[in-house]
Image: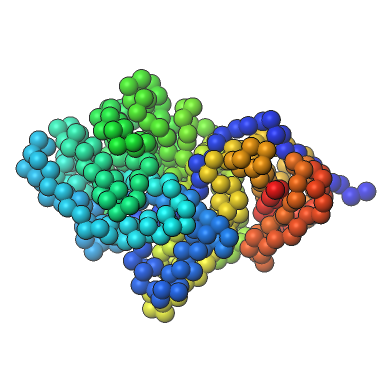
Amino acid sequence: MENVSHVRVDHHGVLQRIDGFGFSQAFRRNELVRALPVAKQREILDLWLSPEKGAGLSILRLGIGSSPAGSPYDLMTSIQPEDPGGPSAPPRYVWDGDDGGQVWLAKEARRYGVSRFYADAWSAPGYMKDNGSDSDGGKLLPEWRQAYANYLVQYTKFYAREGIRITDLGFTNEPDLTVSYASMRFTPAEAAEFVKVLGPVAARTGLKVVCCDAAGWARQREYTAAVEADPVARRWVATHAGHPYVSPVDGPLPTDRPVWMSEWSPDGTTWNEAWDDGSGYDGFAVARQIHDSLTLGGVSGYVFWFGASRGTTRGLIQIDEATATYRVSKRLWALAAYSRFVRPGAVRLSVAATDPALKVTAFRNAGGAEGSEVVEILNTSTAPVTTEITTRPGRATAYLTDGEHSLAATPLAGLRPSRSLTLAPRSLTTVVVR
């Protein structure tokens, strides 16, 4: 008799709330998109943001800061590029209404229904730092803390002028690394101290403070622990966020506040459109990383790095400037399998699978008993797996993502809670019950 695996959703086992899934187009990557014909721009926007045609991404991460103009990592023009005359001098802010193309994308995202905008700074302006440069690490000078906090909040006010409400604000990106482009160092203790300056200013504008986007998940634990150990700092941090470049998501952060995986794309040396080629930067690898972030890290938000870039990018889409065309990787469809169906406000549910080859997560979207239920099943086996899945009653559709399919839909018969389906080898199956 054929072995049948079982997947059963526990509707009473409520885990973390989901804030959403997102991406970034910092470092002027929007300029690549806007150079394309208008019809192709719309196609890319649909792939990112449409919950019917694409991924339905719901968080946009914006880059605050500056690098030397014309460098490969040029973020944007600073809103205060020149020293106004010291930390106590009246600020002299400037605004070009474009912000390296990020305003354009934010307005487009809003039209698709995005309401979560996370603005994060790579560095303070060089004159506020001990190395005098936006780049190459360096530290924020203590006397500039208040001016830097004001600068960050002013950035969000400029976006408000453009009709975009920034919801989340970060003051540092990878404070544990020194790199040749925009970067700035904070120790965990220094980050906790700065939060106490930024928090009250941000709160007056209704902003949620995010800390600290460390480059490694293990290192982020130290930043989170430092904030949580200080009752004043803890008061002001709404979300703890880290990156799994230096060390992977292998467990929760030491906080009961929401946690985001706020930037990641896999390492690699070529543009790759494959679903499962063993490279580590194919679609299957991204699906596995999303699963681990949700289950091991307990993340509420998942933000991929570039939505689109050029050349050997490991982003979701590759743009060819010479031919004014683009190509789509399976990484996008791995992310879309989650982001299209698991919407902001959903909760993750406990789920049990008898076959260890199946990596399973389950979710209930907002709406109480009327909210849809979503089950994500990543079959890591090289063989098909016959599975009986028990969900809530309702009409169900299975969406298959593998080497040949990108969210290919197949209705599952009937309204009963238990259904049988065969999972393709090395595939991601999304079951949606309405």
Specify the color scheme: rainbow
Decide if residue 313 is on the left or right side of residue 412. left
Q: Residue furthest bottom?
A: 323
Q: Does residue 208 lie above or below 375 as drawn?
A: above
Decide if residue 126 is on the left or right side of residue 116. left
Q: Does residue 96 lie above or below 155 as drawn?
A: below
Q: Residue at x 17, y 52 (%)?
A: 94
Residue 329 x %, y %: 54, 64
Q: Residue at x 42, y 38 (%)?
A: 241
Residue 415 x %, y %: 80, 48
Q: Residue furthest right?
A: 1
Residue 340 x %, y %: 57, 53
Q: Residue at x 81, y 54 (%)?
A: 413
Q: Does residue 281 lie above or below 211 as drawn?
A: below
**The quadrant where residue 246 appears:** top left
Give the number of callouts: 0
Residue 231 x %, y %: 36, 20
Decide if residue 239 is on the left or right side of residue 395. left
Can the viewer see residue 22? no
Taking depth in this image into account, of 56 and 381 the one nearest to the observer is: 56
Taking depth in this image into account, of 50 and 277 the one nearest to the observer is: 50
Q: Residue at x 56, y 34 (%)?
A: 16
Decide if residue 251 is on the left or right side of residue 92. right
Taking depth in this image into account, of 98 and 249 the one nearest to the observer is: 98
Can the viewer see residue 407? yes
**The quadrant where residue 138 appears:** top left
**The quadrant where residue 151 appears:** top left
